Each structure stands twice: as structure tokens, then as C-alpha cells.
Amino acid sequence: MKKYLMTGLTVLLTATTMSAQKLQSDNIDEVLKAMTLEEKAQLLVGGGNTSFVGSGAMMGSQKKLVPGAAGITVAIDRLGIPATVLCDGPAGVHIDRRRDNDPNDYAATGFPIGTCLASTWNTELVEQVGRAIGNETLEYGCDVILGPGLNLHRSPLCGRNFEYFSEDPVVTGLIGAAVTKGIQSQGVGVSAKHYAVNSQETARTKVDERLSQRALRELYLKGFEIVVRQSNPWTIMSAYNKVNGTYAQMHRDLLTTILRDEWGFQGIVMTDWIGKRDDMPVYKQVEAGNDLLMPGYPAQVEDIIAAVKGGQLDIKYVDICARRMLEYIVKTPHFRKYQYSKPDLKAHAQVTRQSSTEGMVLLRNEKLKMKDEKGAAPVLPMKNLKTVALFGVNSYDFMSGGLGSGCVNVPYVVDMVQGLKNVGIQTTPLLTEIYQNYVKYAKAKLKADKNPIMWFLDQGQPKLDEIEITDRCVAHELQEADAAIITIGRQAGEGMDRQIDGEFNLTQQEQDIIFRVSDQFRAAGKPVIVILNSGSVMETCSWRDRVDAILCVWQPGEEGGNSVADVLTGKANPSGKLTMTWPVAAADHPSTRNFPQNMDMYSYREMKGWGMPIPNEDFTNHEEGIYVGYRYFDTQGTQVAYPFGFGLSYTTFEMKDEKVKVKNDGVEVSVTVKNTGSAAGKEVAQVYVTAPKGNIDKPIHELKAFAKTRELKPGESQTLTMTIARRDLTSFDEAGSQWLGEAGAYTFAVGNSSRNLPLSATVQLKQYTEKTNNAAAPQQ
Ligand code: BGC
């Protein structure tokens, strides 16, 4: 520290002897020239450790600008360089609600989590959500929001899947680009994260993700590539993990060769929030193209200075990063001295309500068993419903979002009781009272019992234990209610992966609730509806036949209960589609063989004792390669619970008149969608392409485009047109380091899930190649 203060003093002395060139958007060259090495080094390191940057210090006289924000870049007053503020996301602005000596409440809108947003398959709507998120970022005094999360759902067990969009890179890329465009239209930036292959939370800061160049390029990088090419993100966050032997944050192939040289990325790369570590020398990160080290420690500034002075780090790399930092800073609201006021939270509540409604996926909607006379309608939407028995603790403690940095300090959460009440449906009084009292008790207990290492429980709403529901309780409720709704909640977050038992699968207690309620209610001809309030996939096959309807509502943001009520009553017709396969069992995913589970198993502990690298902790082998999600299940013809792209509606649609035209640089697919049912609704046309059999092994089909209709009235039609570039119909050919589209017949199948593709048309395409660098290859 002493040494550091000395460095600060030296900077002060050197700097004051130089003329103060103040930063403007058109004098970056001059400012760069005027900067001392110490100032440049400071610019590349965040101001996470505020002990140095006390007020009056030469560099970084900023105070905590936005309490609860994740980090800041450091001000250099001499050069007119302001501090900028980075706040967490992605489901809304994550900052503290309260500021010292300030009576205002800085609660931020809780928008739907990533999986819910993506399940809308509606890029216009997602862009609108992005605009609202961007506006709150701006009006709460931040410059960048740390999202969207673009990692793939390699496994249904990854703890952060809720923040990510899909198992498919095209959905990830197109939804990610839409939200980025929306956010950045407000004059603030995004940080698309975590680049790349951050597919597990267990041991995320050390695990080496080992995978083929093909899987890397076609799957794990593809979403980032689409976002970079289509929406020009201000910043990208490098991942904690290694990729093929090198930490992502010091991986020059990833951060420079691919990201900048090939894709043309113009913004800055920042690290994920990690301290100084001996196995991540700072000079290697700078050399690789990591412009900003976050959250930033004074020792890292010293390291940069020492590395330049000691000849380990060429000053040209520092200059490159410092220039990019200045280019970033001149775009920010803090540089513009933007006078922020207050976002319109009421308007944003409407945006979140509408978008979460559209992201909900109706998985099951049966006709009632007892009353199943000919022509009887499915149980949903429920008309004329007066009283509901509401089971499951999350009906009363509805989860708006996930845990960890991705949570939002929301002003309120509409639970199921309130949501139903708002549309005139009562809940049975005794059950409601029991659960509401229990929730109060369980929350207090959780707080009292909290293990200090469970820091993340303060970051969001942890899942409370269920209570036992007896047959007598169900019998009592049956007398008063017209229907039973059971909410099954799941919580997950940063730093932990999910377990199969009790997280992917139901707990025994949850199964008991479903079976007991189902036995009595269905025998009495009263419907049983399950609401899945979960950020990720769950097991459904062992219990779904016991219930009449299942609505997956994800973690839909602060308006959750209202959105659920809108769908249950038919005010909104569900049009969400799954962006990941729901398998029969978690182990059906080939990735499960190489995914952390039961890490404290005896054999692992023993290996640790021997000092051997632990599989799925020190390294994770992607044996499945490109066969992730539906690419595997559909190619193998494996039975699944619900396929990728699936989601029911209250109406029916017909897709017809598919046309595929070959254009110079690609293919244009059009299809007409007609509402053939009796309710207004929206439908998603999904285009899956089967490539000709050639030298490259290919999945049976891959999603290459999608489009959603507007709301179609019964009988109404809309023609949707989608374009697919020729380069997007290629595979990555490792031997030739190129994108290769083989010549031959390409089939374009269209439908509303990967397993329901009524239309198909075939066209001949010539060979296409595009050279790339031989980058990020696995180590021998
Ligand atoms: C997370 C990032 C987050 C950062 C700042 C990290 O632990 O991985 O997603 O943006 O913290 O809070």
C-alpha cells in the first residue's frame, strides 16, 4: 500500500508538470499522448478497491457514485476523464434501493429473466424491454449494464441458465442482439457476458472447458458473434473459466483474433469480477486484449506499470487498451454529464407484465377427465372461476428473478394471491392464511439461520421449504374451491449448479402435494393446474398425467402474479415457446456425463488427496461436441418430455405456402400462418435446415431462422418472410480452418417446434467457404 501511495505521489508530481489536455470526443489521440504510464495503467483497472481513490487523490476522486453498482472505472481529473458506473443486470438494474442522506427509493423494475424473455421469440418485444432496461440504467446514473448473458444451456443443471437464453446459438444471438439494440438506444452500454463457454458454475474460476474448435465456433461463440455483428455492444465481459487450457481473460485468440480481427468488435473487453491472481498475470491479460480489469485492485495497476518498465509488456498493448477505454468513455452518460432524473417505473411495469406474459409457455392443457364429454374444452383458459385453492409456498412467495448478481432490488412482487384477486378470483381463506403465516416465519428463520458463506441469499429471493399438505387439508379445500393451483418453485444462481435430486426432479414433498391434490380434485371433477415458477428446466414426465394443465411461467419479473392471471383467464393467449429441450430425465442430456454433480463423492476426494486434476472441476470435457440439446435429441430420435420450440396456445394455427428462394448471398423463406381457431393469438414460425450429406457430420437439422406473427384474429393470416445468409448455412471445418457449406440439396422445414415441422422445401446450393484463423484449438 505504501508503495502504491508513493506511485500515486509520483503520478501527481509528474502529472502536474504536464499541460492538462481535457478529454473530448475528438481529441483522443492528444489525450493519449498526454497520459503518463501510471494514468494509462489506472485507466485499465477498475476502482473496486476504494482505499486508494479517496477524495482529493489525483486519480479517481469519485465517491461511490451509485451505491450497489457492481463497479466503476476510475476518473482522472487532470485529463477530464470521468468515472463511469457499471451496474449488474441482466433482468433489470441491480443497485441498492437506498442512498445515504437521500429519501428517494431507487428500486428498479424486475423484468423477466433471460429464459422467459427468449421464450417470447419476439425480437421486437425484447427490444422494447431493452429500451426500458436501458432507460433505467441511464436514469439511475449508470453507464453500462452487465448483461445480456449469452452462454448456452449446455446442461439443464447449470445454475445460471435462468440468466441465459437458450441451448441454441441462433435464438441466443437474435434475442441478445435485440435486447442490446434496445438498451443501447438509450445512450448506455451493455456488457455481453461471459465470453466464453461459462457453461457451469461449479469451480467456474478455474475449470478448463475443453472442446473442439467446431463446437466452440458453431455453438458457444455463435451467439456472441451474432450480437457483435448485429448490435455493436459497447463492452464484452470475458469469462472466469479457461477455454482449451487458457483463461478466457488472457486468451488472445478469443479476445483479439476472433472477436476483433474476424468479427470486427469495436468496444472494450472487461474481465469478470476477480481479484489479482498469480495464475493470471496482468500483463498477459492486457496483451490478450482485455482492456479493463474488474473490479480492480491497486496491485494490478502496479503490475501493469512494473511489467512495462521491466520489459514484459510492450507499451503498445497498454496504448491499444487505453485508447479503447477513452473511446468507450466518450460515449457514456457520465462523460456527457447527463443529468439523470427518475425512470417511469409505472410504464416499465406494463412492459414487464406484457413481456413476461408472452414468455410463459403452456406445456399441457387437457380436457377435464370427469367432464370429458364430447366437445368439452381444455381447462384453460378458466372462465367463470370464483375460488381457487392455492398450494405451494411459491404461490405466496412468488419468485420474480434469480439469485446472485442477476437479481434486481424490485419495488414489489405481485404474487399469485394478488394476481388472481386483481382479476376477481378469490383464494380459499384458511389455506391462504396458513401459507402466508408460514412464509413470514420461514423468511425470518432463514435470516436467523443464515450461514455467512451463503452471501448470495442476500442477493435475491431464496427458495423456502415446502410444507406438508395432508389429505384432510385437501379434503377441506375441495369443499370451498372450484379448482386447485399448485405452484412449484425453483431457485438458482451464481456460484452453484443445480442437482438432479430435488432441483431438476421434484422433491418427495412436492410430489405428495401434487398427487394428493390431484386425487381428490380430479375425482370431484375440479381441475388441477401446476405453475412452474422456475428459471430452468424441470422433470415433468413422472407427474404430468396427474394434472390437467401445466404453465411454465419462469421467473417473470415483479408483475409475475398479474401476468399469470392474464394467461390463466385468457386475457392473454400464451404464445411462448421453449428455447431448450425438456428431457425425460436430466441424464438424457449427453453433457450430464461431463457435468459437476455430487462433487464430494469419495473418489473425487481421494483424487484430490493425490493432487490429481478433478474431472468437471479442474477440467470439463465436452465429449458431446456440437450435440447439445435438440441437436442431440432430434438426431438420435430420443423421446423427450417437451421438444425445443414447443408451446401450446388457446387457438390453433395452420402453416402453409412455404416458399424458398435462393438469393445471391443466401436464402429467403416465406410462410403463411393462419389462425384456424376461435381465439386471437400469435404463433412462431421456426425454420430448421437439413444440410446435404457430405463430408461433415451434421445434426439432423438446425434452427436457422424464426419469426413471430402479430396477434392474429380467428381466420386471419400473415405471411412471414425470413432471410438466411449463405454463411449461416455452413459448418466449421477444423481441418481447413474455415466455414464450409457443402454443395447439394438443403431442406428448409418449417413448423412450431423441432418435432412438429409440417412444411418443407428443398433447394440446391453451391459450395461456400470462408477462411478463418486457426484459433483456440484444444491442447494436445
Ligand atoms: C458475475 C458477473 C457479474 C459480476 C459483477 C460476477 O461474479 O459472474 O456476471 O456481472 O460478478 O457483479
Image: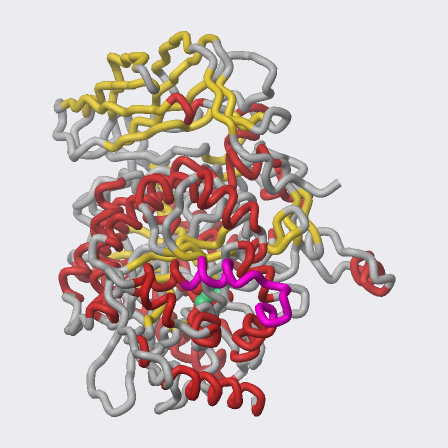
* 717 lies left or right of 516: left
Q: Main secondary structure of the magenta part?
A: helix
Q: Position of residue 250 (x, y in %)?
A: 58, 56
- For this rendering, which residue is in front, 370 or 661? 661
Q: Is residue 735 above or below residue 259?
A: above
Q: What count of labels does the image hold?
A: 0
Q: Position of residue 743 (x, y in %)?
A: 48, 10
Q: Position of residue 331 (x, y in %)?
A: 26, 61
Q: Position of residue 366 (x, y in %)?
A: 35, 35
Q: Is residue 526 above or below residue 371?
A: below
* 734 lies left or right of 327: right
What's the colour scheme? secondary structure
Q: Is residue 177 above or below residue 320?
A: above
- For this rendering, which residue is in front, 568 or 202? 202
Does residue 527 appear anywhere in the picture?
A: no
Q: Quadrant of the N terminus?
A: bottom right
* 130 lies left or right of 445: left
Q: Residue at x 36, y 85 (%)?
A: 16
Magenta stretch encompasses residue 617? no
- For this rendering, which residue is in front, 762 or 552? 762
- For this rendering, which residue is in front, 206 or 377? 206
Q: Residue at x 32, y 30 (%)?
A: 706
Q: Which residues are magenta?
A: 307-322
Does residue 659 appear anywhere in the picture?
A: yes
Q: Residue at x 75, y 40 (%)?
A: 780
* 648 lies left or right of 300: left
Name the quadrant containing residue 371. Answer: top left
